[in-house]
Image (cartoon, coloured by chain):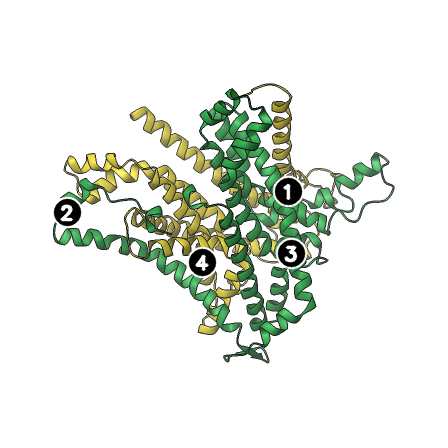
Chain colours: A yellow, B green
Amino acid sequence: MEKSGPRHWLLSAFFALFVLFLYGPTVTIFILSFQGPDGGLTFPMRGVSLHWFANLFEKQMVGDFGGSFRRSMALALIVMGITVLVALSAGLAFRRRFLGATVLFYLTIAGLIVPSILISLGIGLMFNVAGLPPAWWSSALGAHLTWTLPFGVLIMFAVFNRFDHALEEAAYDLGASPWQSFRHVVLPLIMPSLIGVALFGFSLSYDEFARTIMAAGTDNTLPLEVYGMTTNVTSPVLYALGSLTTAFSLAVVVSVVAVVLTMRRRARAAG
Amino acid sequence: MSSTVITAAPTGAADDRVKGGRRRFAAFLPYLQSLPLWLVMGVFLLIPIATIVAVSFWDDQEYALVPTFILDNYRDALSSRVTWDTYLSTIRYAVIVWAATLAIGFTVAYFLAFHVRSTLWQMVLFQLCAIPFLTSNIIRMISWIPFLGRNGLINQTLIDLHLTDHPLEFLLFSPFAVVLAFVHLYTLFMVVPIFNTMMRIDRALVEAARDAGAGPLSVLRHVIVPLSLPGMSIGTIFVVTLVMGDFVTVQMMSGGQSASVGLLMKNEISLLQYPSAAAHAVVLLVTVLLMVWAILRVVDIRKEL
């Protein structure tokens, strides 16, 4: 491909601007969350302090930051576990022909296409009609799974479409049982992708908002808490919370990517 | 729509080994393995949507749902001027955001796929574009306040440069801010699928076109764009459905000055007018499904999986 020339530099500059556009605002609120005690929501910085971070952990703060964080964390971990197991199991099923495979596939994709507010309203109404109280561990859990599972299933789909069946056949020829070939051949090979599915499950649930709003019941998840804050908090404490949860999300992403890269390097070194 | 598209043939060697009861078990296994997915999608997608459809024909009296069969909710929804205006404004957002994200997304994906040479850099830069997907949308919206606010960076810069003597009010809480936030949030839904299809384009085709005398623009128009269409349509489906169903972005970025179908529904829900909200939900679902159907008519994306 052409490597130099004005077109290349123009495209490079465009890409750089795009990355700046993606990250610039987040970096800005990260900086502004270190505002001095008298600082506001915009520049200039009036001193540098940890005042607003400290403020987050004080009692008089509106809402329940600690409780909602714990709930979101627990919910994201549950969603992650269920997403990995269900997506893996369905991925294995889709390798064979079975009645209803196409319908199930389109139903799963529908989870991505149906607007979030419909899923939220639908689950809320379903619990209402059934006379059950909605809660983060029941209705909101289901709402999150309709968002994380399609991604998980699509990833498993892509993985098994490119999977070399000769490896499994070799295991069978060597006398492995179906379970042994799954446990010792298939599972190690797809492990990086499974970790990817886990990462998606965790992050998408931890930050999910639109599907949760009518399905969370009385106790807020963290994104609902942040949403509530945007309407009644006008101090940089909002930025402090935003920076903290974004840093947390990024830390999770970076550590997972690091784990996958290490696994690959080890696999390469061993093979 | 044959099921062969999405199922891989069983491996012959595996089948030879299972006999009698085990063969029957092997044939039964996919049903067992797909059962959890059926259960989750059935209980939390199919039944809720069926509930919405049912409730859209119900009546509500004194905030209690009354199961019956009336068409009033649809009549009210479809005969109201507000509904039509809201749909118009939502579709306008969808079209503008679609055009912007497609243009930006295509350019970024094209740069990554055809102008970054090392595979390592390609992956690193691609991840850089994809990571924000795993962070909170609400916080990414909040992060525009320091830029667009009355005393924000853009206004201060304009005043410092003497381009204006009073802060521009239209930056935050305006349709402009809504579109900006949408583009900020959803461009990666274009970048990822377009990049994926572009990476699968046989480079020999590009070389052949060049050998046959095609200039860079001609290659782009006659080779790369047609072959990237599936990725563009997957991205289009994502962006259009996300914008059509949105309520948070429009509410937060327009400061309540702009309407969207999702926001209309959300307001009805907070007034506990569930049957009316359900009727709007059904209309929205039909609209979105028609749009997706129209996009799928243009390009067959099943090959892409």
Determine whether, in the image, residue B192 is placed left or right of residue B252: left
Disc 3 sits on a residue from what chain?
A: B
Query: Would you identify the image quadrant in which residue B251 lies?
Result: bottom right
Q: Which residue is mark 2?
A: B18
Seen from the viewer's position, the closer of residues A103 and B290 is B290
Q: Which x, y percent locates residue A249?
A: 52, 43
Point out which mark residue A141 bears. Answer: 4
Other residues around mark 2 within 10 Å, as few (<14) / some (14–19) / many (≥20): some
Other residues around mark 4 within 10 Å, as few (<14) / some (14–19) / many (≥20): many
Disc 4 sits on a residue from what chain?
A: A
Mark nearer the N terminus (1 vs 2): 2
Residue visible at 53% across and 62% down in the picture: B286
Determine the residue located farthest toward the left in the rendered image. Answer: B20
Per the image, label 3 sits on a secondary structure element best described as helix
Viewer-side label of 1, 2: 1
Labels 4, 2: one chain: no
Determine whether, in the image, residue B2 is placed left or right of residue B270: left
Q: Identify the amino acid type marked 4.
A: Leu
Labels 3, 2: one chain: yes
Q: Identify the amino acid type marked 3.
A: Thr
One can see residue B125 in this view:
no
Q: Which residue is mark 1?
A: B100
Label 4, label 1: how far apart the Cα atoms are: 34 Å
